[in-house]
Amino acid sequence: MPFISKRKLELETEIKGRAKELREKSNLNDAIKCHYELLTKLYLTNPLYFKTLFKANRFIVGSAILGIYYTRSSSTFKDVRRFCIANDLFSSNALDSFLLFLRVSQRLEVFRDEDDRRKLNYKPTEKALNETRRMINTMLRPCSLLSADCDADFYLRQDDFIPRFFRNYGEITLNRLFIHDMVPGSGEFLSHDGGHMMMFNLFQESIKQGSLDVKYNLLKASFACCVSRSLIRRCLQAAASRQLLTIREDKNTVTLKPEFMTMVQDYFCIYLATVEYGLKGMD
């Protein structure tokens, strides 16, 4: 059994406590809609990157890369590799492929350590930091809807927003507090490319149609989430196996269980609570 630190337990208690408070907000679904609409605009600027990133393990690794960079005096690929392998996030080959993807797409710069030429240091590029800032913004606006204390414009005006945010947010990731572990059922979506987007797309269709019996056009959903229809089918089948929904292919209908709607709301609240924790370093 892996060692669980006292700090991880403290963080988990704090995040879950705050998520419970957010869960009780009467305009929660409005905040979720706001996130989805902002994310859709961002997502479509670079579908390949964002559908790749919004898969649980890759999202965690991306957060760890920035968390390590902003909380340690020197950041190396060895640090990232040690974190990923220890937490069974990636095989060595899969991790190398993902890191190469970030380098080739000009989101990571790599250079030799001045004191030890055997070490490969890295730093995020301006391109990566701008994308990260815009991604966090998809949660800042919803945060301001649910909390009078959250001034999204104040945070966005800070020149050192990303370093200060990840000095706090990195604590969550590096203490192995993973959202898909905290919200049962979310992993059925998050284990797939674009899973985060698919989950909210289905949720929003239910809200829009005013019913748990959702007329779900797979072609339209595939365009919205920038993934194939076959991937969406696999994702839905995985969710059906967890009793979150049922699929009626003869009528192009997905019948969502109340448990699905609750799961998405819980996931959003946990996610937002982690973002709020990152913002603490900027107050």
Image (cartoon, rainbow, N blue to C red):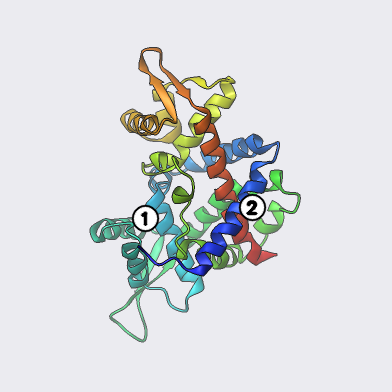
Q: Give the residue number, with chain letter if any, for mark 2.
A: 18
At a point 53% along the width and 29% down the height, the residue shown is 258
- Report how many numbered discs are placed on residues in the image: 2
At a point 53% along the width and 22% down the height, the residue shown is 212
At a point 53% along the width and 26% down the height, the residue shown is 205
Disc 1 to disc 2: CB gap under 8 Å: no
Q: Disc 1 and disc 2: Cα gap in Å?
A: 36 Å
Nearer to us of marks 1 and 2 is 2
x, y percent for residue 187: 41, 43
- The crowding category of the residue bearing disc 1, from other C-alpha atoms within 10 Å (few below 14, some 14 to 19, many at least 20), is few
Instruction: Name the secondary structure under disc 1.
Output: loop
Seen in the picture, residue 73 relative to 108 is either above or below; the reply is below
Residue 169 appears in the rendering: no
At a point 31% along the width and 63% down the height, the residue shown is 85
Residue 266: mark in rendering: none
- Residue type for callout 1: Ser
Q: Give the residue number, with chain letter if any, for mark 1.
A: 105
x, y percent for residue 140: 63, 50
Q: Residue furthest front?
A: 1
x, y percent for residue 237: 35, 29
x, y percent for residue 99: 33, 60
Depth check: give the residue in front, 275 or 117. 275
Instruction: Name the secondary structure under disc 2.
Output: helix
Residue 139 appears in the rendering: yes
